[in-house]
Image (cartoon, rainbow, N blue to C red):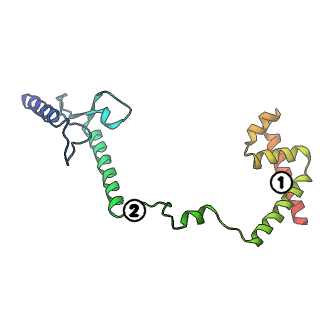
Amino acid sequence: MAERQGLFYLCNKINNRFKGSVGCRSPPPFWFAHKPNGGTNMKRINLRDMYPFIKTDVWIDLDDEVAQEIRRFDLNESAYKLRTYRHRAYYSLDRNDGIEQDVLFLSISPEEYYERKLSNEQLYAAMCRLPEKSFRRIYAHFFLDMSKVAIAQAEQVDERAVRKSIERGLKQMAQFLKKM
C-alpha cells in the first residue's frame, strides 16, 4: 500500500513538473496518475485538455482501459494526420487549373437542352390534365418537397387520402405520357 501511495506521489510530481513545458516533445493530452483504489488502477485526466470549451481544470478518474482507448484514439488520429501530410493526400479544387470550373458548370449540348425542354413540356401537359386536387398534391410533394403527412395536415385530410390521390395522379400521368 505504501508503494502505491509512493507511486501516486511520484506520478503527480512528474506531471506537475512537465505541466507547462514547451518543446519539440509535448506532454500527453492527459496526465497519468495511479490512484490507490482497492486494487483497481485509475487514471486521472483533465477534461480541459480534451474539450476546448472548458476553461477551467476539471479532473476526473477513469478506468485504465478507458484511458488506454482514449490514448489509442489520439495516437491513431495523429498518425492519420501525419500520413496525409507525408503523402500529400489532401486535395483541393482551388488549384486554378480549371477542375472546379468544369465540375461546377457543366455545359449542356443543344440536343440535351432540347430533350429536357420537350420532356418538361410533356410533363407539364400531363400535369395540367390532372384533377385540381391531384395536381396540387403532386406539385407539393415532388416540386416543393413536402411530405405526404405535411400535405395532409395543410389540407386537413387523412394521409391515406393524399397518398392515394398522388398514386392515382401518377398513374393518370403515366397513361397520358404513353399516348404521346
Q: Which residue is mark 1?
A: 170
Asked if residue 128 is positioned above or below residue 152 in the image, the reply reads: below
Give the percent coordinates (x, y) of residue 27. Answer: 21, 42
Check whether the beta carbons of the residues at disc 1 and disc 2 lie within 8 A of each other.
no
Choose mark 1 or mark 2, whichever is in front: 2
Label 2 is placed on what type of residue?
Ala
| Other residues around mark 2 within 10 Å, as few (<14) / some (14–19) / many (≥20) | few
Give the percent coordinates (x, y) of residue 42. Answer: 22, 33
Residue shown at 28% from the left, 29% from the top: 60
Figure quadrant of residue 50: top left
Give the percent coordinates (x, y) of residue 77. Answer: 34, 50
Mark 2 residue element: loop
Figure quadrant of residue 136: top right
* Left or right for 39, reference 75: left
Q: Which residue is mark 2?
A: 89
* Left or right for 89, reference 1: right
* Left or right for 118, reference 8: right
Q: CA distance from mark 1 to mark 2?
A: 48 Å
Give the percent coordinates (x, y) of residue 152. Answer: 79, 37
- Does the image show residue 141? yes
| Other residues around mark 1 within 10 Å, as few (<14) / some (14–19) / many (≥20) | some
- Does the image show residue 157? no
Give the numbered dot on residue 87: none
Near-viewer residue (58 or 86): 86
